[in-house]
Amino acid sequence: MSTPLVEARGVVKRYGPTTALADGRLTVLPGESHALVGRNGAGKSTLVTVLTGLQAPDEGTVSFDGEPAPPLTDRTAWRSKVACVYQRPTVVPELTVAENLFLNRQPDSRRGFFSWRRLQAEAADVLDTWDIHVDPTARTADLKVEDRQMVEIARALSQGARFIVLDEPTAQLDNREIERLFTRMRALQESGVTFLFISHHLQEVYEVCQKVTVLRDARWITTAPVAELPRASLVEAMAGEALAERQAAAADAVVEQAEQVEQERADASVVLDVQGLTSDTYQDIALTVRRGEVVGLAGSSGSGKIALAESLAGLHTPTSGTAQVEGRQLPFGDVQGALKAGVGCVPRDRHGQGLVFGMSIGDNATMSVLGRLGRYGFVGAARKRGFAAELIQRLDIHAEGPDQPVSDLSGGNAQKVVMARALASDPRLLVLINPTAGVDVKSKESLLSRVDTAREDGTAVLVVSDELDDLRRCDRVLVLFHGRVVAEYPAGWHDHELIASIEGVDHG
């Protein structure tokens, strides 16, 4: 057996009390495409930061060609070993392809003068060497996504790296662009380049990779040749056998309960009616949410589910299609308009979008309903504090009172404040985007119980989440794949079947 090009053994990485990676293992042979798969939170990104020298492991080892990895401070040595091409390009858009290829390492000048002609000539040589057909004089911002990715790969290869990590490279590509990327990958493999391919779309793993490594719950689960691992077995390795077995028993009870209310819900009025909604990240979306119904949206990071939810909350403007709330047209690109139309939203990022950290709990919780608490622009302090105190009690926010700075709160209680504000306006449609991300187990259960309460109050709820536990509260779950709704699951689904659909195993 040849010496592994890259090998990680027993890698452990902790962030305070959190263990992000408990047992990271990876062995990649020269010239192969090796897939790294796992659910969100499995430890993939943490392992990549260690493999690319961005962070040192707390335990374990990493080696290249049988030699220990360079010190973190020797960035030149790391760049000669490995490079990562991320979903979001790291090229400078306003610079040319040639300038990006040789950024901070321009060819030596002669007689003290920098030669643009020489820069472009050497860039053309690099691109020709690796058979990458991109104009070195083109402005990088004008390139297609797939060509920007190839420029990043060429830059890494020109620095000596032969191990390229592709992190969700197909997330922003259409089917034709994906096939072209794979064709280029195969050609580069034949030239001696080795890839670590990270993707949520398992059908791509079977199309382009020879080996696959599965991480689950921050641990290595298995490494196997792709040709010898049936898709059902791969999904099972990602989901966990024990988990699937436990859900099989619980699913029957969920289905029975769902059947009892199904007819009741079918007679309920439609609150949200979406028809033909299209943008650059999702296409021809049609869905309805009825009064007292909780509908989930599932999908990988590039599926378009978050952009769709944010469009309904007024953050984006689709290119075509309509959305109505109780028969009235929903205003796109207008957050205040969406709020007035009856939409409450818990955004995906409580720090950047959900909270104003310089303000108190009471100010944050009531900022969307100030017009109801006063007249002519005047809001009584006592009335606002009283309303905020009711929200604090209703959401079980552990705090000293409405005047406490929201910056003092734990992650779970801060998220409850965001939920409180979304509920303060008594919305007819509640849009929740990753509502339990980064909170403790107790806070998570408290937040999800608000979903049950909203359902009982007759609110229509749309839950968009990467967490399967969040989606288990839903009456049905729609799966988005490459911007389209490809499947619908009633309550009582099993993890393995939903994961298979999210990962693209059961559809093209």
Image: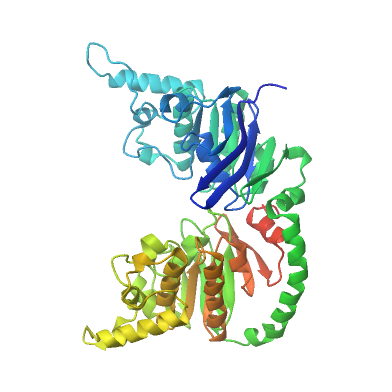
Rendering coords of residue 475 (x, y %)? 64, 75
State the image quarter where residue 193 is shown.
top right
Q: Is residue 402 above or below residue 95?
A: below
* Residue at 63 percent of width and 87 percent of height: 267
Q: Is residue 407 above or below residue 403?
A: above
Looking at the image, which is closer to me, 334 or 389?
389
Rendering coords of residue 272 (x, y %)? 51, 77
* Quadrant assignment for the N terminus: top right
Q: Is residue 282 above or below residue 131?
A: below
Q: Is residue 356 visible?
A: yes
Count of labels in the image: 0
Rendering coords of residue 498 (x, y %)? 67, 61
* Residue at 41 percent of width and 81 percent of height: 391
Of all residues, the one furthest to the top in this rendering is: 111
* Residue at 44 percent of width and 37 percent of height: 148
Q: How is the image coloured?
A: rainbow
Q: Is residue 168 visible?
A: no
Going by the image, does 253 lie left or right of 430? Answer: right
State the image quarter where residue 144 is shown.
top left
Looking at the image, which is closer to me, 35 or 310?
35
Looking at the image, which is closer to me, 150 or 45?
45
Rendering coords of residue 329 (x, y %)? 42, 78
